[in-house]
Image (cartoon, helix red, strand yellow):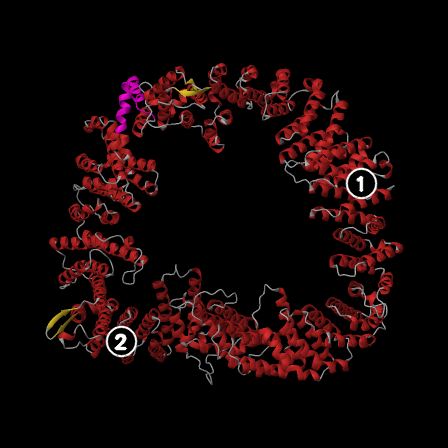
Amino acid sequence: MSGNHTQAFSLALIDAAFDKDEGVRQEIAQALRVLGARHPQLVLTACHDYLSKHSKLVQVHRVIVLHSMEAIAKDSLDRLEQPLARKLITLASDEMTRSKDVQAEWQAAASRLLVALGCRFINEVMEDVLQKFQPGVLPHLYIVHTLGNLSTANVYGMVPFLTAILGTMLPMLAMAKQDAMKSVFTIALAHFSESILEYLANLDKAPDPTVRKDAFSAEIFASYDILFNGWLQHKDPKLRSSVVEAVGQMSHLMPHDKLEEQLPRMIPGILNLYRKHSDHLHITQSLCHVLDAAVEMGSRVLETQIDNLLNTLHPQICTTLDYNNHTAVKNHNEVLRCFTVLACAYTDRLVAFLLQKLEVHNEKVRIGTLTLLKHLVNSTATQLDSKRLLLLTGMKLTIQDNNNYKVRRMLAQVISAMAHHDYLELEGGEAMVEFIIRQCALPCLPENPKPRTYDPEEVTEEGLRDMCDNILNLLTTTVKRMQEVLWPFLLEFVMPVQYLNALAPVCRSLAYLGTKRQQAGNKETLLDHAGRDLPTPHALLTRLLVLSSFPYRGRSRGAPALRLLHAVSALIHPQLGRVWEEEMPPLIQHLEENSEESLAQRQWEDKLLLLLSRSLETVTACDEGWSCQLSEEMSRHLHHYNSFPQEKGFLYKCAGVVLRQIPNSDVVRKQLMELLHGVRHSEILEREGVAVCVGFCATTHLDDTLSKLQDFGKSDILKKSPSLFHILKDKSDVELEKAKSTVILCYGYLTLHAPEDQILARVEKDVVKHVLGHFNTKVLGIKVETKDMTIKLSLMKTLTLIARAVHASSSRRNHPYTFSQKGELLHYMQDVIRAEPADALRTPIRQHAITTCTHLLKLAPPLGEVDTFELIKTCMNSVFGLPAPVADRSKEENGFNLREREVLYEDTLAALQDLLKQILYQDLSPDQLDNVYKHVEGWITSPRECERERAVLTTSSLLAFYLDKLQVRTVVSFHSLGSLLGRLVPRCMDPVGSVRRSALHGLHSLLSIQQRHAGFALDHRDEAVERLRTLHDTMDQSDSQQQFHSCSQIGQVIAQCIPQTQLQPLLLLLFEGLADPHPSCSSAASVVINTLVRIRGSSLGDQVPVLLSVLHSRLESIAAEPVKSSVLQTVSLLAAQNLPAVISCLLLHPLPYDRAVGQMWGSLAMEGGVCRQALEVLTERLDRQQPYEERRESLLRAATVQLATLQPLAMTCAVGALLLRPESGEAVSLLQPLLFSSLLLRVGSTVGVRLPKDPTGQGPVRITTPLDVCSCSVEALRAMVVRSGNEHTLRTMADEDGWELMKKQDTHHQGVTVLARATAQHGATHLHSVVERLEPALTAPYPGQRVTVAAFFAELLNHRVTCDLLLTDGLVSALLRCLVDTSRLVRMLSIRGLGNVATGAAGKVHRYSTRLLSAMMAGMDEKDDVDDSVTLESMSGLSKLLAQLRGTNVEPILINIALRIRPFFEKDEDRVRSAAFMVFGNLSRFGDGESKADFLEQVHSSMVSLLLHLNDTSQQVVKSCKFALRLIGPLMGSANISGMFQKHLLEEAQLHYGEFINDLAKHIINDFPEKINFYIMGNISFFKSTRAEIRGNAAMFTGFLLGNLSQTELQSVSLEHVCGAIIMLLRDAVPAVRIKAAEALSLLHEL
């Protein structure tokens, strides 16, 4: 019986195998394979018989069956019996040879079946095949093809046959005329040769170890002769390709003498194919085999082919390689292997060839040659050992003659390979290292970057440089023998400028090597300079120290340079080791902890100069001459840094430190003149550097320095041409001015650094005199003032330095030094400032001039009042009036980019502030403060932001300075307090944040100054004044409410602190501030005014009537909101006295209310009592009014429309406007039930209501702009909830879009549901009153109100709070009455609410059980339920009730409910199916009582449906089925089944349906054997389901059930019917069903 069914299944699957769907075909093939794995004999027999009987079967169908037979044969080869194998061999052989024409897919499938069978039944296969492989007769093409594949599939079985096969085949080769036949012979010969070679290579495993290569050599050679001399010349490229591949394999089997004889023809013949074929892989592989065979036998003839080989293979290496082309990559590797083979025998020839190719000036040739050379260096180290020196020589020539980055990259890789094989230790190795370093020195930021190309192999400077950095590092740290090569050779690259960019990697390597040598105990203090261009110790110190001054340049060279200095300290000087051991590590750590952006450059230079100074102190103590040598070395080095002005400037400073340490005056004078004559005066950094150098030198050599400066000033360099007309023409005059600038600057730094006890007496005679002499030139007796900016800046810098030095010296004397030229210099500085353009800041002249004035002011004698006034006016007008630096972002002015200009503006303003502070400091009094403030006052209210910002910032800075320096000895009146406060207060809300902060700081300083002048102690801290500090953070906030609050606090502080005498001036200025062009500033003024009036009370009472008289029109014209707030106070006061009249008046305004009217309504909320009364009046009127009128839409239509009445609409808008004010919250809390119920009913009664067609004519209320009636109601309700402070309700409504849902007629009840849920959860305080007010509306004439209340009550019953508040009975009774409402929506909501009783009042469910169950059952029978909404609510409610009811309530109708539910299992609507399964699951609670037996029958009847829907397309249905099965499981009496349900049917778990049903089927069979047939037939009934996935699931379930039945159990099943039904599914219209049917059949292998 089993065999019959298996055969039937097999035949059905075979018959259906040619399905039009690819997925079905694959599944059928897999099913056949599964059946074949269990019953290979039966399935293969069925396949054999099917193909035998259906001789006219379409070819594709036959191919599918043959593929399945091949797969089964491979899987079950060991279990096949010989008779069947013979039949299959015969079938396959016949299928393969039936058609003489080549039909590749069919014949190849049959051939593969033969090959699969031949892996075990080789003799039987060979017996059949050889019958069709007879001598003298050309065999079928696929006979030869099969023999070839058999030889590689079963090597040990086929090789013994190959002698005879080759003997038979040899004559056939000449008979082959067709290309296909020749090709198959060729491929077979290649396979034969491959299998023979494998056999011979594994003779220890072979059945006949006596087999030798000679046994095949003659036939192989004869075959080779035909293939190579005949077929290789054929036009067909595929044939040529197969021939050359075969020749390669055959070359190993040819007799040595024959191979030697053929090589002169064989190699050229193979090489010629390169020109004929685009795909070279097979050719190269064949050539490699031939070369390997030739070299292995020691061929002498091969040498004659070397040139041809090299010239042919080399270009392939030179071709650009596409790494995405795997064939090309393989060919490339094969070519390299060919060269490796040749290198083993012909090293000399190969090396000579490569060196010759390196001389070719072609990028690709050189790259290819270098690639090959790298490969050979790594792979044939032994063979190339004697050629290393020769290769280095050739490489040396190449590296000197190439600028191509790609070639350089390849050269670097070859050099790296050579270094790892000890090449670089030989002569020429240093040249290789030098090449690497040259690449490390490639520019970091090229001035003219090359345009980006699309070449994927492009090599950039950055990429090449980084690679060579890594190579140098690897050679230093990983190749031990390279250390002797690199040390001290790398030191030669420290000094040359061309290697500057390589300094970082070179220093790293040298530091590593130096440290290693120290650790090894090497104590060398001198380097061997013989034959090397090594730097001297002084040169090395100078170079590394200077380059460390900008440590992050040159790829962060600073730290490596310092590490190198540390490592070679003994080489610099033996005494430096101890000093640098202490000094170097902190410096290096400082660099590692910072970056280029965070490093303070000046402090870093000071650290390095301090290091140099301490080093000199240590060395000079025992070796004075060393410092002189270092000074000379530094002088010689200066010209090396002409292209690096910043580094050169630092070198000058270093030279100054060295000169300061040299005791020999002659040396100092000589070096000083050399430095002054060598400087390039046109470079600003060099001028600065040499000036600092002169200053350092003057510290210990003042007289010598002054003398040499004077000598230099008289030299020819500073002499002007004596022609008046030549002044503007001589180009050298520019250099003259620059040189003068240098000298002037030198005098400045000399004065600053000179000893204080020597310089003061000489400053005007020996310094200022010469400075001014150089600044003003006389030509032909006429004084000519220079216009050169450089010399002006130098003069200012010098005068500043002189003033600093003089002030510092005179401050330590009893009598201050009188600087007689102070006034003249100040006047000149003002002239310079006035000469600057007023509309732009292009140079730092203004800043430096003001700074110079600041320092000159410190000197005696003091400046007069008039001069001081003029100085302030000149400087302030010059700075404050400048336009903002962002005004011209797109241009660069005089080389300044935007950021540099911004910094220049900031520095210039800071210089002005310093000047004003200095003026103020000279007379710290209210009068002096007032004098300075008068200059600033007009700028504070400027309409230009930049001017206000500068003025307020300056004022704040001055006040803070005044406070800090103030020392009050007698109490004086601070008479300017009011005016200062009046100007600063509005600025506390200026649009510019920096102005606000500065104004607040200024207020704090002003009030603190007032307290000081009032006599309070210095340490006194007034709490009110200190509160201003806490407002600092609020100045950065944009929240207007927060800003108003801050202004109010500012007003409170001022009100508490200001004297009465200053109050009137303050208010006058604040009233001016109300007209400030900036609304925020006018608001600040109004807030502070109100605060002052409220606190400082009685004297300002006359101002209140003015504020109350502002009417509606005034509100329209005021822009500042705080001012409007002040005006709206009037409306609030009026309403407090005349509330009915105010309300009636405001209600007459047109709808929608304009902003002013809305604000007026909102002002009623400012006082709690007024607000509460207004809300009561409005809601009372609203409840009495008719919400809308019903009218016919038109005379032709009977349908009516609902048109809003305008009085209630106006009241609704008024309530909404009033509730928008936060102050209404208190009133809302008192009236919440009234407001909530009234507004909710108002919403319900306006859903879908329209405006009248002519709203302008309805009574006193007019509508000027269309508005949505319902939206007004919803917004009023939302405002009420906001004011109630129920954040949770608001968040819930916002998250679920509840407000919007309420506005639409279709979703109104959903929005009400959201509101009810939120209210029940978070706002139940007034719920009892709300329900009482809403319940009468259930009988209201307005359907919208009934829907609203029904939805609200339905959701309330879903929450426990109704039970706690004793509302359940009333709500249930109310909803039961609604079951007969005319509105289907009201009925649906009522059923929903009754179902929710199970959730909100679970303890009371049994009390209403009969009525509730009746309601649910009636709901499922709803006739007018087009969208299943009532049905769904009924089943949902039933599920909830069943979860709570007692057995006594349900058991009498349990079976009735189950029967009523089952028809819904197969409904098309997903939600209905899901709900039905949920109800069925919940019924299981009552299935263990008296009705258990009957209920179990219902369970078994529904089980198949439940299990099939576990794989439903709807996830909602799947979850419901899981839920039901988990509950049903324990009732079934099967622990195994129940366990599976509980374990695998978790709600969110991923279910492997097939595995689950398979395991479940086993338990069903074991635990319910009597139900097996019932389940099977139940599944079959679903084979005709309208849902494809259910049909497929049923097929799988049936398959699992039948597949797991024992033979005894199968007897009770009508197998013919069942199997026939499954087989019929193979013809289903849906591919997925056919796939499942095939899979099901594969499970029935035991039938």
Q: Position of residue 288 (x, y in %)?
A: 68, 74
Neighbour tally class for label 1: few under 14, some 14-19, many 20 plus, Cα within 10 Å: many
At label 2, which amino acid type do we have? Leu
Q: Quadrant of residue 1469?
A: top right
Where's the C terminus, which quadrant? top right
Verify CB contact (< 8 Å) between mark 2 and mark 1.
Answer: no
Above or below, 1002 against 462 in this view is above
Q: Nearer the viewer, residue 1531 or 262?
A: 262
Q: CA distance from mark 2 to mark 1?
A: 107 Å
Question: How far from the left and from the top, in percent, is residue 762?
Answer: 18, 70
Q: Quadrant of the N terminus?
A: top right
Please state the horizontal and vertical placement of residue 275, each as a whole percent of the image.
Answer: 62, 74
Q: In the picture provided, is 749 more to the left or to the right than 557? A: left
User: Which quarter of the picture shows residue 216?
Assistant: bottom right
- Residue 1137 counted in the magenta span: yes
Seen in the picture, residue 93 relative to 672 is either above or below; the reply is: above
Q: Say if residue 233 shows up in the picture.
A: yes
In the rendered structure, the answer to whether residue 426 lies left or right of residue 1209 reads right
Which label's residue is closer to the chain start, 2 or 1? Answer: 2
Q: For residue 818, say whether it is visible.
A: no
- The residue that mark 2 highlights is 676
Q: Which residue is mark 1?
A: 1603
Q: Could you tell me which secondary element the residue under label 2 belongs to? A: helix
Residue 968 inside the magenta-drawn segment: no
181 relative to 998, above or below: below
Q: Main secondary structure of the magenta part?
A: helix
Give the foreground label among 2 and 1: 1
Residue 169 placement: quadrant:
bottom right
What's the amino acid at mark 1? Gly
Q: Which residues are magenta?
A: 1127-1151
Number of numbered markers: 2
